Amino acid sequence: MKAVIQRCLSANVKVENKIVGQIQKGFVVFLGIGKNDTDDDLNYLVKKISGLRIFEDENNKINKSILDINGEMLVISNFTLYANTKHGYRPDFLDNMMPQGAKEYVEKFIENCRNTNCFKKIASGIFGAEMKVSVENDGPFTIIIETEKKNEKWKKINYCCFDICQQHTTRWPHCWVSPTSRYICKIL
């Protein structure tokens, strides 16, 4: 999976000149699904985006997450993120997942993000539609995440701390796994 995340002050998406999704301060996520993507890639991306600390704190340091600022997210499916331009001038899109599978992953991504309880609101465009996206960038601050380049340790760690953190019934954002493979609950 590939995600282009833009920090924004506001954003909206239109289909046939009608706004189908809009947000205030938060993230716009352009999401591409590759033909070899798995649930592991999906979980990694949800975890990474939910925890990104790219908002300024009271000392103007980039130290706050989307949860800390009570932010919102607009998700836009974008198959062109997998454009291959290595041969000639016309891109091919052979590395994309087929539309039905990609649509399911986009829907799963949105649902899993909702389940984190990190976002005040999550809006989205319409999969496969011709969309017009307006973003009031904040910065600009843009990050690209590609799950195929994720840390190899991810494959060895079970990021679901639901069974480990017995004191809490919600997995996110209270619990996470540290790079040392120890489960941590920040509420304890």
Image: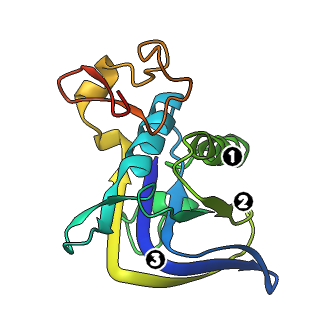
**Pointers 2 and 1 in contact (C-beta within 8 Å):** yes
Q: Which residue is situated farthest in the front direction here? A: 188
In the image, is 163 to the left or to the right of 85?
right
Mark 3 element type: strand
Tell me which amino acid carries mark 1: Glu
Tell me which amino acid carries mark 2: Phe
**Pointers 3 and 2 in contact (C-beta within 8 Å):** no
Q: Residue at x 38, y 42 (%)?
A: 147
- Which residue lies under the disc numbered 2? 127
Residue 29 position within the rendered picture, expressed as x and y whole percent measured from the top left = 51, 63
Question: In whole angstroms, how far apart are the C-alphas of marks 3 and 2?
Answer: 22 Å
N-terminal-most mark, 1 or 3: 3
| Colour scheme shown | rainbow
Residue 72 position within the rendered picture, expressed as x and y whole percent measured from the top left = 56, 64
In the image, is 141 to the left or to the right of 93?
left
> Mark 1 Cα within 10 Å, few/some/many (few <14, many 20+)?
some
The relative height of residue 80 versus residue 140 in the rendered view (above or below) is above
- Which residue lies under the disc numbered 3? 8
Residue 139 position within the rendered picture, expressed as x and y whole percent measured from the top left = 32, 82
The relative height of residue 88 versus residue 168 in the rendered view (above or below) is below
> Mark 2 Cα within 10 Å, few/some/many (few <14, many 20+)?
some
Q: Residue at x 70, y 66 (%)?
A: 125
Tell me which amino acid carries mark 3: Cys
Question: In whole angstroms, how far apart are the C-alphas of marks 2 and 1?
Answer: 9 Å
- Which residue lies under the disc numbered 1? 107
Is residue 83 visible to the viewer in this orientation of the structure? Answer: no
Mark 2 element type: loop
Considering the image in quadrants, where does the C terminus appear? top left
Mark 1 element type: helix
